[in-house]
Image: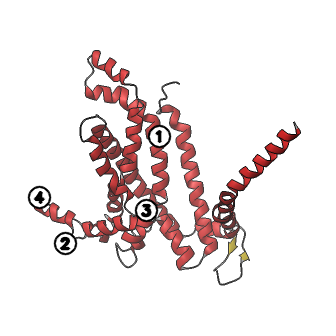
Amino acid sequence: MRKRSILARKENLEGYLFILPWIIGFCVFTAGPILFSVFLSFHEWHIFDDMKWIGLGNYKMLFTDPLFYHSLKVTFEYAIINVPLVLIVGLLLALLLYPKVKGTSVFRTIFYIPSIVPVVATATLWIWIYNPEYGLLNFFLEKIGIDGPDWLYSTEWVVPAIAFMGVWTVGPTMIIYLAGLEDIPQVYWDAAKVDGANYWQRLRYITLPLLSPTTFFLFITNLMGALQTFAQAYIMGGGGEGFGAPANASLFYCLYLYEQGWSWFNMGYASALSWILTLIIFVLTLIIFKTSNKWVYYERS
């Protein structure tokens, strides 16, 4: 028993030594910055000055800041357009590419490839596509008699344009929907065919209900991603200052947070902005979970 105890302690020590690099990395690069941001949110700090404790001052300032409300509006407008669009297109592609016919794997790869292209390269490509003078999109619209808008230079179209670009990286959503389709027992579709159900009836009463857990997962993850959009807004819109639409039309929430922290060095205020966003995402996720029992169907429930 004593030898076993010594051996067990030795194995435990070896295990902790193996995970020690991860623990150090987590504490230094994840947990540490998170706790420090909480601490900063109660201070006024401009990096080069001393910290000044102001309690809830930063949080009170948020609710009198018009750009806070404006950036929230822009971000939610983007999410309302982008999230349903990505889910619908991802589902349609998955339904098209689900049948196991020759060449399907090639098309799955083709549709997935854009999602592994760096965001900077994708945004740069779409800046050219959206160019109102020589862009590819307005060129094709002109061919069918439509006068294309200014897209990224228009206060009305800049947010929808960035949201439409999200369809370009729909690959991960498509792949997860394909996995969800693979999980549906074939016997359900076969039984429906025997009963005379057509394709649309099978889609409505079998496929979509059994895919609802997958849709639930994708809805939450895509919503979180949409509310934290930064790179596309920074590259394509710049918040409306300089390149892009005027009047802060593309001032996304995370872009405003970045500007407060790294352009104006209001680190305390930026930390408060980040925690308000965390709270918003938490509340929305909680609401979705609480309402999921009304529209998410689990086969074994």
* Residue identified by numbered label 3: 74
> Which residue appears at 39% of the width and 46% of the height?
173
Q: Residue furthest right?
A: 2
Q: Amino acid at mark 1?
A: Phe
Report if the CB atoms under discs 4 and 2 are less than 8 Å apart: no
Residue 63 seen anywhere in this rendered image of the structure: no
Badge 4 marks a residue whose secondary structure is: loop
Badge 1 marks a residue whose secondary structure is: helix
Number of the front mark, 3 or 1: 1
Q: Choose the circle earlier in sequence order: 4 or 1.
A: 4
Q: Amino acid at mark 3?
A: Val
Q: Residue furthest top?
A: 195
Badge 3 marks a residue whose secondary structure is: helix
Q: Choose the circle earlier in sequence order: 3 or 2.
A: 3
Q: CA distance from mark 3 to mark 1?
A: 24 Å
Label 4 environment density (alpha carbons within 10 Å; few <14, some 14–19, many ≥20): few
* Residue identified by numbered label 1: 216
Q: CA distance from mark 3 to mark 4?
A: 31 Å
